[in-house]
Amino acid sequence: MSDTGRKGSVSTQEKIETREPPLYKVLLHNDDYTTMEFVVAVLENVFKKTNAEATRIMLSVHHEGVGVAGVYTKEISETKVSIVHELAKQNNFPLRCSMESV
């Protein structure tokens, strides 16, 4: 038997609150040894940037000491940082990558 239409019945509806996951900036840091070409290749291949975007970010890293490669959820940011460090190690570059909350 349904409670619909019964006098004095209370209808309760559970409100489900959803929140967007926190985001993190993935940063590339300048050093004196990693080539500009390698940084551009990392930005194109790991972060899926166009050549123009990758070049702009690389120049920011070169001139300002740091550049934002992208903004992602925590897990994706951690994975991208790890991939960058592994690629740098394989290619004998000291390129550093980090993440910070937005």
Image: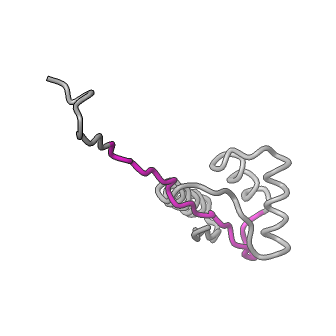
User: Which residue lies most toward the left here?
Assistant: 1
Q: Quadrant of residue 32?
A: bottom right
The answer to which of 2 and 21 lies nearer the viewer is: 2
Residue 85 point in image, percent of width and height:
55, 63
Residue 102 point in image, percent of width and height:
62, 67
Residue name at image x 68 percent, y 53 percent: 42
As for residue 51 lying within the magenta part, the answer is: no
Task: Specify whether 39 is left or right of 91.
Answer: right
Q: Main secondary structure of the magenta part?
A: loop
Colour treatment of the image:
one colour
Quarter of the figure with the N terminus:
top left
Q: Quadrant of residue 72?
A: bottom right
Residue 17 point in image, percent of width and height:
42, 51
User: Which residue lies most toward the top here?
Assistant: 1
Q: Is residue 10 above or below residue 37?
A: above
Residue 37 point in image, percent of width and height:
78, 56
Residue name at image x 63 percent, y 64 percent: 25
| Residue bounds of the magenta highlight | 13-35
Residue name at image x 85 percent, y 57 percent: 56
The answer to which of 76 and 7 lies nearer the viewer is: 7
As for residue 16 lying within the magenta part, the answer is: yes
Residue name at image x 82 percent, y 75 percent: 64
Task: Specify whether 1 is left or right of 95.
Answer: left
Task: Specify whether 40 is left or right of 90.
Answer: right
